[in-house]
Image (cartoon, coloured by chain):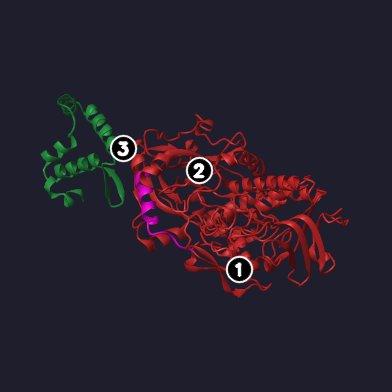
Amino acid sequence: MGADGIGRCMIDYLESLPNHTKLSSDICIVGTGPAGISLAKELIDSGLSVIVLESGDFDYDGKTQKLYSGQVLENLPPEPLDVSRLRFFGGTSNHWGGSCGPFDPIDFNPRAWITDSGWPLTRDDLHGYYERAHSLIGLGPYDYRVSSWINEDWDLIDMSGTDVKNIVRQTNPQRFGQEYQTDLENADNIQVILHANLTSIQTNEALNHVTAVEATTLGGESITVEARKIVLACSGVGNARLLLAFGFGKKLPALGRYFSFHPRMRTGELLLSNPIDRSRFPYRWHYVNGTRMKFQFSLPNQIQEREKLPNHAAIISEMMLPNTMGYNAGKRLYNRLRGKIRWDGVTDDLYDVLMDIDGAYSQWSRRHNEHKISQLAVATYMDQPPNPDSRVLLAQEKDALGIPQAKIDWAHFEYEPAAVQRFNEILASSFGAAGVGRMKIVDDIEDSQHFKVLARELGGGSHQIGTTRMSQDVSRGVVDENCLVHGLDNLFCAGSSVFCTTSWVNPTTTIVALAVRLADHLRAQSRQAS
Amino acid sequence: MYLLDHPEYRSSYQLVELILHGCSKRQRQLATSDPRCMRKLLSEKIQQDFRRQNVLNLDGWRLARTEVQQWALMALVDA
């Protein structure tokens, strides 16, 4: 039985429903990325009827993907909008790398040296939700203490007595669509509708209550959903874009502002005093009791406060020569034999190996026979201070449904390049103090133009953050601490768009934790209402 | 590069004094008579320099002042 009482399969295509059908439900979720799917999953058997609208299909489709096209001024963030995000069931989790971690407590606290920092909730408020998020993402134990992961087979650098600490990251590239499709299909109270693009949000005359949303296929078929509560889970850029396109910007001055991503930049190289055996190098991904994890570095709270720095982090990785054509082709052949990639293009790869057999063999030999690492690349993962002048706007161009494309105009504060430079100076001094080796910092980080060049090099633009951020102050935020849009009583946002700060860490754990929290909030509201 | 920026230190005697600055008489005696003691002393001084941010940036490399003075001394001796 469908969410609105009509008997049907629980995942439908919009075009299979009669045109202009009116559906009703308790909750309507728009989007099936990690936020949307986590929210829906947590509402299974809640007693609430839920309709989930997804623009795409179960797999990639070029025409639907094109709906994500947009503009990125100065190529910052570096990834085009229709490349960094995916628009089909499961959303961008269909191609993400899986790196995870909770925000640090300091990320939630107001920091006097970072304007507009501070969330209307604390890390403690999310503690239980982070644990539940871990389970949804398929990560290991919710334990990020370094002592829990130290292994006698590794040479972890002892940074005690320095200004830098070791930290832990985990990874699991959970494909939310594939993982939870069956659960949603089998849920009696959840109906997923594919090919359903949100094309309008209708409100009452007082503009304080959403009465219905409309969804349309690329072919023009449409339905209307009247839901008691609506949750937009359309990505960090998508939420702001849709709200701006549907006219909500007039009453929400912060809408689209405070756009951040996670610039990652190559900031130095580290020459080790004593080369480390590659097998004992803990700063790359390893499996520990079935959990894929690694170590990296960040600054303790007191150092951030002393230096007035954001919460940056650094990774060190082996410096490798670029892969040769023959090596890459050989690697792809090997991965086909392991069943990791498809067999399309195998003859091209065989040809490439034969044409560059020297390159293939010499690189393979070097990687497998040289056991010691003596030279490491250092990359900084930035915690971007919230900047109201960094914005998602609407472009003149429209997509195939007539909705204006998003345009990103990223900005950084003048002090940010100097903050990255200072972070790396502290890192270099700490490596020296620990007797690890000597670090060379990349030239001209503090030069604004070169800073932008560095910010383009290593990506980080898939993390699109802050455009409908939380704040009690409507001039500084779009949603309250429960993700309810200001001025409305039944429209919510989910995903990284609600973040107040970015931290350095990948956002998915916090996205899912907040989605789970929102699910609990919606259940509680429903119980109170009844 | 350090000597170019600090021509006033183009004297091996001055550089030795700078390197051993802060060491007690006993430490100096041990260091100058036993290479192992000298290595240990220099290593500790270098790590202390990093902890105290007593560092120099030379061509992007962040180095302890003591070790830079040490290399300057070796450059003078070799010249």
Residue closest to the far right? A7
The front one of A304 and A459 is: A304
In which quadrant of the rendered view does residue A126 lie?
top right
Residue on which disc 3 sits: B51
Image location (x, y in percent) of residue A421: 36, 52
- Label the magenta part by its dominant secondary structure: helix
Secondary element under disc 3, as helix, strand or loop, is: helix
Question: Chain B shown in which color?
Answer: green
Spatial separation of the CA atoms under disc 1 and disc 2: 42 Å
- Tell me the amino acid under the disc marked 2: His
**Which residue is found at the position 18% from the left and 37% from the top?**
B19
Q: Residue at x 81, y 69 (%)?
A: A20
Tell me which chain the residue with mark 2 is part of: A
Mark before the other along the chain sequence, 1 or 2: 1
The dot on residue A69 is: 1
**Which chain is painted in red?**
A
Q: Mark 2 points at which residue?
A: A368
**Name of the residue lying farthest toward the bottom:** A396
- Membership of A423 in magenta stretch: yes
The amino acid pointed to by label 3 is: Arg
Which amino acid, by three-letter code, is at mark 1?
Ser
| Span colored in magenta | A410-427
Alpha carbon separation for disc pair 2 and 3: 37 Å
